[in-house]
Amino acid sequence: MEKLILMLLATVANVISSPLITLQELQNQQQNKAKFCSSLLHFNKYYYSPGESIAINGYPADMSVHWQTGNIYYTLINNEMKMNLQVLHSSGDFETIKVVGLGQSSTVDNLNDIVYLATDNGVYKYNDDGTTERYAALNEDVMYLTVSHDGSLCIVFFSGSFNVTDVNTFAMDAADNVLIGVKGSILKFNAYDRNPCDETPNKVGKRHSKRRKQKHTTSTPTTEANEEYEE
């Protein structure tokens, strides 16, 4: 009798601790998933879904992402065509970068973890504490700057569309998410290396489908069986 009571109590506790979902909640989940999957884009070997939209006051230009911190650097151009350098921190806070003269553009050297600022009186380096220091091209009016890579060939070509109009700038972060700057906002598209809407269990792509098998031979028992890969 005591064991029976303990079993009943355990069953009741398990039922209470298990969250119940209503029919309405289930329908909402299905509708949200259907909406998510219908907006999914697929090109360049990645799947992209629309993410958050960050409102800004003006046009973002020359956007780049610091991969280590997730901070987004860009030039903000207002309706009067005045511009200043801004950073959107991963925390969601905006900061105007103060420089001597006119800040015109910025870029990030992610290989060496350095942020460069182009101004009308030279190139500065931006420090983690928000300070700047002069670096190169002193007293020169520098409009744009970029960082050379390790010698790899870079090719720009059309492979798909995010269906966004009036694009002023774009960038990618360390996770291959795409950021697109338009008037009044920065749009984010989240990247997936596999289709998040594919519910096929244990699906293996072609590049991972090789398995090892033993090749049957008629040789003597002292001869080792050969191994080969099969698609």
Image: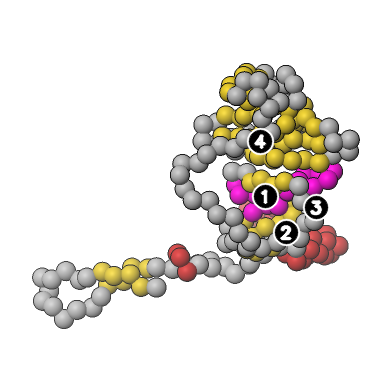
The amino acid marked with disc number 2 is: Phe
Q: Are marks 4 and 1 in contact (CB under 8 Å)?
A: no
Task: Give left or right: position of 177 versus 77.
Answer: left
Above/below status of 120 relative to 216: above
First in sequence, mark 4 or 2: give its number: 4
Q: Are marks 2 and 1 in contact (CB under 8 Å)?
A: yes
Check disc 3 and report its element: helix, strand or loop. loop
Q: Residue at x 75, y 66 (%)?
A: 38
Residue 17, can we see it? no
Where residue 27 appears, as percent x and y from the top left, is 82, 65
Where residue 196 appears, as percent x and y from the top left, is 65, 61
Furthest toward the right, the residue is 80
- On whether residue 188 falls in the magenta region, the answer is yes
Check disc 2 and report its element: helix, strand or loop. loop
Report the Cα–Cα distance between label 2 and label 1.
10 Å
Task: Give left or right: position of 181 versus 228.
Answer: right
Q: Quadrant of residue 37?
A: bottom right
Report the Cα–Cα distance between label 4 and label 1.
21 Å
Using the image, tell me which numbered label, if any, was put on residue 162. Answer: 2
Furthest toward the bottom, the residue is 218
Q: Residue at x 53, y 51 (%)?
A: 154
The amino acid marked with disc number 1 is: Val
Residue ID for mark 4: 144
Quarter of the image with the N terminus in it: bottom right
Which residues are drawn in magenta?
A: 175-191
Where residue 219 appears, as percent x and y from the top left, is 13, 78
Callout in the foreground (3, 1): 3
Residue ID for mark 1: 178
Check disc 1 and report its element: helix, strand or loop. strand
Callout in the foreground (2, 3): 3
Q: Quadrant of residue 124?
A: top right
Above/below status of 141 relative to 44: above
